[in-house]
Every structure is written in C-alpha cells, then in structure tokens.
Amino acid sequence: MKSHLIAVALSLVLSGEMKLPGGLGTYQVKGKLTREAFTATYQSAGDRGMMSLKRPAP
C-alpha cells in the first residue's frame, strides 16, 4: 500500500492506493482531516464514493 500525508495549517491531507487481489483493480483514497471533520473520496474498479465525519458540537 502506498500512502502520503502532508501537514497543511492544522490539517492533514492524505492520499493512498492499493492494488486489490483477484483482478479487482486499484483502490484509491484522497481526503482531508481537520480538528472539526474528516472527508474523503474513494474509488476502485467496481465502487466509488465519499465519506464524511464531523465532530459533534460541544
């Protein structure tokens, strides 16, 4: 699995990819993590989507 993290003004930008077994292609993910939220997109040969998590209000 290949991945990268880059610190940018109190946030982390991430990206990674991994070859899936059985001829399913390559899984890729890109996202951003801050104190308030985590958002990411992902895709592979048979699926794609978005994830979003937010910290609840105090």
Image (cartoon, helix red, strand yellow):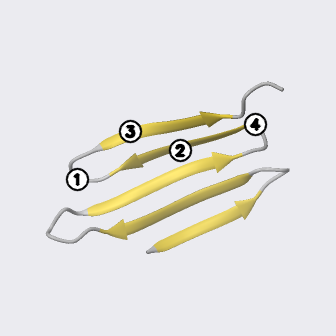
N-terminal label among 2 and 3: 2
* Amino acid type of the residue that numbered disc 1 sits on in the rendered structure: Ala
* Amino acid type of the residue that numbered disc 3 sits on in the rendered structure: Gly
Toward which corner of the image does residue 21 lie, by quadrant? bottom left
Give the camera-side residue of 55 and 29: 55
**Relative to residue 41, is residue 37 drawn left or right?**
right
Task: Residue 58: give x, y in percent of width and height.
Answer: 84, 26
N-terminal label among 4 and 1: 4
The mark found on residue 36 in the picture is 4
List the residue tagged with mark 1.
45
Residue at 49% in and 39% down: 51
Question: What's the distance in space between the residues labelled 2 and 3, CA to CA?
Answer: 9 Å
Question: What's the distance in space between the residues labelled 4 and 1, CA to CA?
Answer: 31 Å
Determine crowd level at label 4: few under 14, some 14-19, many 20+ residues with C-alpha closer than 10 A: few
List the residue tagged with mark 2.
40
Question: What's the distance in space between the residues labelled 1 and 2, CA to CA?
Answer: 17 Å
Residue at 26% in and 68% down: 20
Determine crowd level at label 2: few under 14, some 14-19, many 20+ residues with C-alpha closer than 10 A: some
Q: Nearer the viewer, mark 4 or mark 1?
A: 4
* Amino acid type of the residue that numbered disc 4 sits on in the rendered structure: Glu
